[in-house]
Image (cartoon, coloured by chain):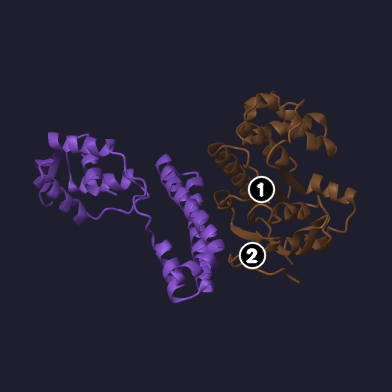
Chain colours: A purple, B brown
Amino acid sequence: MSTPHVLLGLLADGPKHGYDLKRAHDLKLPRAKPVAFGQVYATLGRLARDGLVVPAGQDRDAGPDRTSYELTEDGRKALMEWIAAVEAPMPHLTSVLLAKVVVTLLVGDADQAREYLAAQRAAHTARLRELTGVKTDPDATLGDVIAADFGIAHLDADLRWLRTTLDRVADLHEEVITR
Amino acid sequence: MSYLSARGLVRSYGRTPALRGVNLDVEEGEIVAVTGPSGCGKSTLLHCMAGILRPDAGEVTYREHRIDTWSEGARAALRRTEFGVLFQFGQLVAELTAAENVALPLLLAGTGRREARTAALSWLDRLGVADLADQRPGEMSGGQQQRCAVARALVTEPRVLFCDEPTGALDSLAGEQVLGHIVRLAREQRTTVVLVTHDVQVAAYGDREVMLRDGVADPTGLGTVAAQP
């Protein structure tokens, strides 16, 4: 995920300081990995250096001064370009899962690869059930549901790959060790 | 002993084996997903456990009664009173309205017409399709029809609900709504559910998953299991 662009997006409706940005990030992307305060301030520093945001005043609520930031014209332009840009769909076929199967076949045998694939399938299935629980919770927001849907669709794709690869392990072992 | 149990089930169609010794234990109130590729025997297992088919060998017990040896009539009575069955499609009678379809199992069980209609309307309401009560299946979408079918399967308040690919004919959003209703109502009623599906996303609605492969349970998921004795 591009944290700089997400922060630019969160600044689009008006100035905010780092604390507000952190809260807005975790609220709007409820199932994403929470962003750390340090990461927010460091990112704001880089965005300011590049002229995409500028300081817009300071708050003092019985604590240290907090600098608010707002988008510049360049910042708004960079944000709109990022929104419009189509992401490259899977430019590299790399995955820890894929690498593990090949390396297991290099150093072990087909049975070890099968055991790994079955264990990974069980872990994926458990996570799929957990996310299904998130989306069927009566208190789930639509944001929770679409975040869970995103995870569910990817886990489903992985599970299909795990199942098919399980059936292909013996042939793949032959290819890996003879190449 | 488990609430519902299959022990060493064997079933063939002609010379083609569908089940080659399947064991499955289901506890009361549990939602168990039975998964596996096409032809693995999961629908045959459901049909045997629901008393629709008789296994060639093995036993099916329900609440400590061995039911696979019961007569066709006794098993049909069990399906009318204790079990509910939900298939992929084609379950509603085309000539009857939604309310008449849902009331049908109650009428067959001897419930009075007015009481059966009241119960049917209540179940249609719980499935969010009360406004379709007087419409016929041909006037409804696939998702609406399947919600009526869920209402019909649950109107007798069965202890066990058997679902065979219940969302297989629906688009993903309609399927999700039907599954959400099944799981919510099963939890409310403490209904035991056996859910057969080839779809891992559907299986994830269950409390646990049992995989079948080539007519036997595949507990490790390795796909290399031998027939059980």
> Residue B146: which quarter of the image?
top right
Q: Chain of mark 1?
A: B
Q: What residue appears at the point 67 percent right and 34 percent down from the top-left corner?
A: B148
Q: Position of residue A6 (x, y in %)?
A: 25, 44
Q: Earlier in the sequence, mark 1 or mark 2?
A: 1
The alpha-carbon separation of the residues under discs 1 and 2 comes to: 30 Å
For mark 1, give the secondary structure: helix
Q: Chain of mark 2?
A: B
B199 horizontally vs B133: left or right: left
For mark 2, give the secondary structure: loop
Q: Is residue A80 above or below residue B159?
A: above
Residue most extreme to the front: A179
Looking at the image, which is closer to me, A154 or B187? A154
B93 horizontally vs A42: left or right: right
Residue carrying label 2 = B218
Q: Quadrant of the C terminus of chain A?
A: bottom left
Residue carrying label 1 = B189
Q: Residues within 10 Å of mark 2 (few under 14, many from 20)?
A: many
Q: Position of residue B189 (x, y in %)?
A: 66, 48
Q: Position of residue B147 (x, y in %)?
A: 64, 36
Residue type beneath disc 2: Asp
From this viewpoint, is residue A118 visible? no
